[in-house]
Image: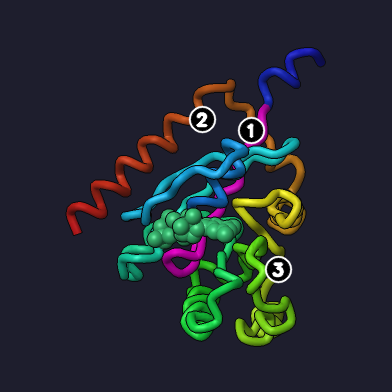
Amino acid sequence: EMGNLSLRQRKPIKVLVLGLDYSGKSSLLFRANFGEVVTSIPTIGFNVETVSHKNIILQAWDVGGRDKIRPLLRHYYQNTEAVIFVVDSSDEERLPEAERELLSLVSESELEGVPVAVALNKWDLSRHMSRERMHQALGLAEVRKSRPCKSFSTSSVSDSKSDFFDMLEWINDNTRRTEENRRSNIVAGQSSVPVLQRVVFKLKTLLLT
Ligand SMILES: Nc1nc2c(ncn2[C@@H]2O[C@H](COP(=O)(O)OP(=O)(O)OP(=O)(O)O)[C@@H](O)[C@H]2O)c(=O)[nH]1
Ligand SMILES: [Mg+2]
């Protein structure tokens, strides 16, 4: 029928973007949305960015790595369909810290079985470590035992060095949703309201706790 296409739209996939501070989470999302390098400042709390590519829509919750708000982080976990774990591939010194962060993440019961895409970020820098070195140090073989997990080299500076959009496609292919569930019957425009309300609610939660 004719009405089908105009009324049915894809629901965004809820993705948590996590990783140490300075790994480049916000820069990656800004680059994907604006196609250029956007100066980023350390994220306090979180940003919610919508990223779309082909027919894939992600609602990315970009959580600042700086504040140690781990107990509060649990508020964001609900309904998470995938995680993008961003690692600075040029920072060998902080690799053990990144590993600990990833480990603690995959041990969260709310995130059980949730696919993890690991972004080996800042791949444009010539001093980046090898993929093998990073897989080993991050323990990705272990992570893969409990969920789909794959690494992608990414860069918010150089598109030719970045597999960011391949990563989005992998996420789309590896979430548990069925094709039917990817669509909603909500008329375009309405779906942004609950999202906004949720953001306000989370902000209040942050401020009051
Ligand atoms: N060379 C290079 N620099 C990058 C890349 N991505 C981010 N940066 C730089 O790394 C620094 C940190 O980037 P942010 O995007 O603010 O990092 P973040 O992970 O959002 O940090 P928090 O919000 O504190 O958790 C900035 O100086 C960026 O310009 C990249 O792909 N290549
Ligand atoms: Mg940030």
Of 22 and 106, the residue lying toward us: 22
Can you see residue 21?
Answer: yes
Residue 47 at what x, y percent from top left? 41, 47
Residue 198 at what x, y percent from top left? 37, 42
Dot placed on the residue nearer the N-terminal end, 2 or 3: 3
Residue under pointer 3: 151
Label 3 element class: strand
Point 72% across, 76% down: residue: 131
Do the residues under discs 1 and 2 have CB atoms within 8 angstroms?
A: yes
Quarter location, residue 74: bottom left
Residue under pointer 1: 184
Do the residues under discs 3 and 1 have CB atoms within 8 angstroms?
A: no
Point 31% across, 70% down: residue: 68
**In front of the other: label 3 or label 1?**
3
- How crowded is the residue under tag 2: few (<14 C-alpha within 10 Å), some, or many (20+)? some
Point 42% across, 66% down: residue: 21
Residue under pointer 2: 191
- How crowded is the residue under tag 1: few (<14 C-alpha within 10 Å), some, or many (20+)? some
What label sits on residue 47 in the rendered view? none
Label 2 element class: loop
Do the residues under discs 2 and 3 have CB atoms within 8 angstroms?
A: no
The kind of residue on which mark 2 rests is: Ser
In the rendered structure, which segment of residues is drawn in magenta?
9-25
